[in-house]
Amino acid sequence: MNQPDPAAPREQDWTDGHVARWQPFLPELDPVVEGAVTRMKKLSVHLRRVREQSLLDFDLERHEFDTLHKLAGRGGSAAPSELAQDLDLAPASVTGRLDALERRGFVRRTPSTTDRRRVVVELTDAGRTTWLGAMDVLGHEEERLLGVLAPAERTALNDFLRRIMLAAEEDPSLPHWHG
C-alpha cells in the first residue's frame, strides 16, 4: 500500500473539504466564492491568534498594545487628545490607559514646551522595544504565509484584495472602516 509522502505539498486544504461537504446541500453554492471567503476568514482568525499569543508573550493587554501602536504611529510622541481621537475613546479612558502604561515604564508624560497647560506622551525605549517585539511576531508570521507566493503573486493578491475592500467600503449601511 502506498503511503503519501509527508514532505510533498498538499493539494487540498481544510476549506476544500468544507466546500465539498456543503455542495450537496447547497447546489447553488459557488465553490470559488465560498472557498475564497472561508479562507480569508480562517486566515484572519489565524493571524488574530498569532497576535493574541504575541501579546501574551510580551505581557501586554490588547488595549495596551493598541495605545502603544497609535503612539508609535505618531512618531512616538502625541498629545493625549490626539491619542483619544486615534483610539476613538473618551479622553478620560485614555488617561487611565496612560497611567497604567506609565507605571509599566512604557510611556512618559512631559510638559509641552509650547504650552504649559498641555502634556506630551512619549514612548520610552522599553515601550518601543515591547511594541516592536509584539509587532515582529505577527510580521514574521505574515511573511511566512505570504512567502509561499512569488513577489508578483503577492502584488496581484494585494491588488485583488484592494478591489474587494473598495466594494465593501462602498456600502453606506456598514460602520466606518478604520483600524
Image (cartoon, rainbow, N blue to C red):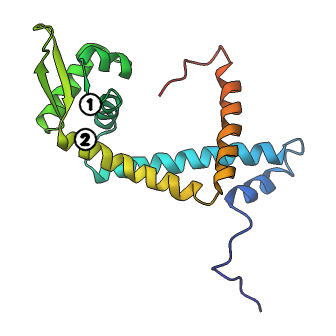
The numbered disc on residue 160 is none
Residue type at mark 1 is Gly
> How packed is label 1: few (under 14 Cα within 10 Å), some, or many (20 or more)?
some
Q: Secondary structure at mark 2?
A: helix
- What residue lies at 76% left-to-right and 44% top-to-bottom? 34
- What residue lies at 13% left-to-right and 24% top-to-bottom? 109
Q: Secondary structure at mark 1?
A: loop
Mark yes or no: residue 55 visible: no
- In x, y percent, where is residue 17? 74, 59
Indicate whether 112 appears above or below 15. Answer: above
Which comes sooner in the sequence, label 2 or label 1? 1
Could you give the CA–CA distance between mark 2 and mark 1, rounded to whole angstroms? Answer: 8 Å
Between 3 and 165, the residue placed more toward the observer is: 165
Q: Which residue is the extreme one toward the right?
A: 27
Quadrant in the rendering for residue 33? top right
Residue under circle 2? 128
Residue type at mark 2 is Arg
- In x, y percent, where is residue 144? 52, 59
> How packed is label 2: few (under 14 Cα within 10 Å), some, or many (20 or more)?
some
Q: Is residue 96 left or right of residue 75?
A: left
How many marks the image carries: the answer is 2
Contact between labelled residues 1 and 2, with CB atoms less than 8 Å apart: yes
Quadrant in the rendering for residue 125? top left
- In x, y percent, where is residue 83? 30, 21
- In x, y percent, where is residue 74? 33, 26
Mark yes or no: residue 159 visible: yes
Indicate whether 62 appears above or below 167. Answer: below
The numbered disc on residue 76 is 1
Between 39 and 121, the residue placed more toward the observer is: 121
The quadrant of the image that shows the N terminus is bottom right
- What residue lies at 73% left-to-right and 64% top-to-bottom? 12
Q: Is residue 40 left or right of residue 48?
A: right
